[in-house]
Amino acid sequence: MKTSTKNQTNSKKRPRLVLVGLPASPGYAMGHCHTISNREVTVVEETLPNERLAQEEQLFLKALHNTIKEIAQIKQITVDRLGIDEGRIFDAHLMILKDPTLVNGILDQIKKEKKNVQWAVHTQITALISSFESHKSALMRDRAMDLKDLYHRLMGALDDSGPVIMEDEISKGAVLISHELTPSILISLKKGQVLAFATDSGGRTSHVSILARSMEIPAVSGLRNISAMVESEDTIIVDGTGGMVIINPNEDDIRKFEEKLEVFNRQQRELFTMRQLEPMTRDGKYITLHSNIELVIEADKVLDYGSTGVGLYRSEFLFFRKGLPTFEEQVAAYKYILESLAPHSVTIRTLDAGGDKLIPDISAANESNPFMGWRSIRVCLEHEDLFEMQLKALLVANTKGNLRILLPMISSMQELRRSKEHIEKCRKELESEGVFCHDVELGVMIEVPAAVMLVDKLAKEVDFFSIGTNDLIQFTLAVDRTNELISSMFQPHHPAVLNMIHKTVMAAHREGISVAVCGEMSADPMSSLLLVGLGVDELSMTPWSIMECKKIIRSINFEDVRETAQNVLKMDDTESVNAYLKKKYSQTITDLGVSCFISTPESNED
Ligand code: PEP
Ligand code: MG
C-alpha cells in the first residue's frame, strides 16, 4: 500500500491521504465518509443464581428468533432487488443461526455453566469466528465475516438496540468505510443511497465484492487501515477501477476526479454505442465474444452488453443454497437462460463444485488441498444420480436447441468417456419417455496440464474446447489462485502457460473444432490481443467487459497480433513477454482508454 501526505489540507484542515488497495468493483465516486465501526461490545462474564437461568434462556431464544426474522427480511429485500441467487447468500446466515451445535452450545453455557446470555453468545460465536478466520480457504475466511455480522446482530437483539446499521442513519451521497463490510449491510441499503465503499480487508471472491459488482457500486478493498484513518464527514474519492482512494482531496484531486468520471461516463456511453458492432479485426477476422455468468438473472444483460451468447454459465452457483436444487428448479433455471438467449448459443458447464466453491450438501469438509481434491467432474462421476439429474435437466430445458454442455476439470480420456456415457444414457431414457432431445455440442474445459498433454486425443472426441486459464495457470505454475501472498507469481503471460494455450489451439484447429478462453485473462486488454494472436476463436468474460474488448478487437490487425504471438512464443520469461507487449501495444491501449490489470499494472497508477 502506498500513502502520501502531500498537499495537506481541506477546509477542515484534515490531512489529504492517498491509499492504494485492490480494485473490487469498477467506477468512480466522491462523497462523504460514513464509517461503520462494528459495534464495540463489552461483555462481562457472570455466574448467575439458578433462578435467573430461565430468564437468560428466554432472552436468548427471543433474540435468536428476532435475528432470524431480521435476516429473513433482508433476504427477501435482496431477492426483490437483485434476484433469487443473491438472496441465497443469507441462507448461510440462517443456517448458522439454526445450527443445533451453536444453539445448544449457547444454551448449555447458560443452563449448565450458569453463565449470562451475552457471555455465552460471545464465547460460542467468537470461537467459531477464530476457527473460520484461520481456515486455509479464502471462501471460508470470507464466511468469518458472515459470522461477525451475526454476532453483532445477536448482541444488538440482546440489548434491544437493533441491527448494527440502519439505512436511515446514512445520508444520501455517503461512501461507506469499514474494516470489513458484510453483504447484509450492503443489501439493506436503498438503491443509490451509498455511492461507493472502501474497506480495510476483503478480496475479489468475497460475497460483498460480488454484490458490489452486481449492484454496480464502485468499491476498493484491501486498504488495510482506512477505517482507522478517516473520520465521518471526511470527503473521499473512490477509484474502483484503479483500486485507489483519496481522503480529503485537494482542488487538484477533485478536478482530476471530475475529469476521470467524465471520461469514464463518456467511455461507458461510447462503449454502449458499440454494442451492435461486430467484434471484427481491421483485416476482417471475426472473434466470438461471449459472456460468463453466475446468476440466472444475468441472462437479461448478456445481449444488452453486446455479446452474442453465453460462453460459460457456472451452474454450481445454483447449488449454493441449503438443500440441492430439485430437477424442476434446475430445468426452470436453465430454461430461463436458454430461452432468453435463443437462438444464440449458451454454454452451460456441469457442476464444478469444490475448491473454493464449497457446496454444503456435496463438498468434502477439511480437505488439505481442496483445489486438487474431491471436486468438479470427480464428484459428478461418483454422485451419478446428481450428475444425471443435472444432465437430464439440461436436455429437457434445451427446447430451442441452443445448449452446449461443457465438462469441467477433465484430466483423462476416461473421465470424458464416462461423462459421455452418462449423457447418452440420459438422452435415451428421456427419449423413451417421449421427450424430444435436440443434439447438443459437447466441450471440455482445458484447465489441468494433463488435459493439455491430451489435447490431440480430446479434440477427436469433443465439439469444442474452453480454456479455463484461472485453473490452468494455478495448476501449471503451482500457484494457488486464492493466495494473496503469491499473487505476483500468478502469471498469465508465463511462457509455459502461453505455450499450453498455443498447443491447445493447434490441436483443436487440426480437428476442425473451436477454442474459447473463459478465464479472467480474456477480459484483460493486453491478454486478449495475445489470445487472438494465438488463434483463440472465442473470448468469454463478464458481460460489462465485452464492449471494451470489442473496441480493442476492432482496433487491431489479426496479422499483426498473430506475428506478435509467434514472437512471444519464442521468449523464455514473463518479463520479456510483458515488456514486448507493453512496447508494442501500450500506446494503442492508452489511446483506446482501457486499462490492463495483468500485464501492465502500473498503468493503473495515478
Ligand atoms: C477457469 O478455471 O479459468 C474457469 C473459467 O473456471 P472457474 O474460474 O470457475 O474455476
Ligand atoms: Mg476452473
Image: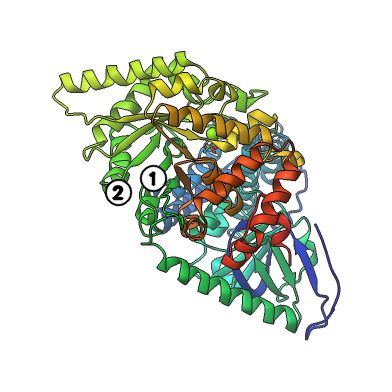
Q: Is residue 453 left or right of residue 129?
A: left
Q: CA distance from mark 1 to mark 2?
A: 8 Å
**Tag 2 residue:** 341
**507 versus 296 height, above or below:** above
The percent position of residue 16, horizontal first and vertical second, equals: 80, 75
**Tag 1 residue:** 310
The percent position of residue 357, horizontal first and vertical second, equals: 54, 34
* Quadrant of the image containing the C terminus: bottom right
The percent position of residue 217, horizontal first and vertical second, equals: 55, 63
Q: In which quadrant of the rendered view does residue 227 lie?
A: bottom right
| For marks 1 and 2 on the same chain, the one whose residue lies earlier in the sequence | 1
Q: Amino acid at mark 2?
A: Leu
**76 versus 476 height, above or below:** below
**217 versus 311 height, above or below:** below
Of 15 and 476, nearer the camera is: 476
Mark 1 packing: few (<14 Cα in 10 Å), some, or many (20+)? many
Residue depicted at x 84% and y 68%? 4
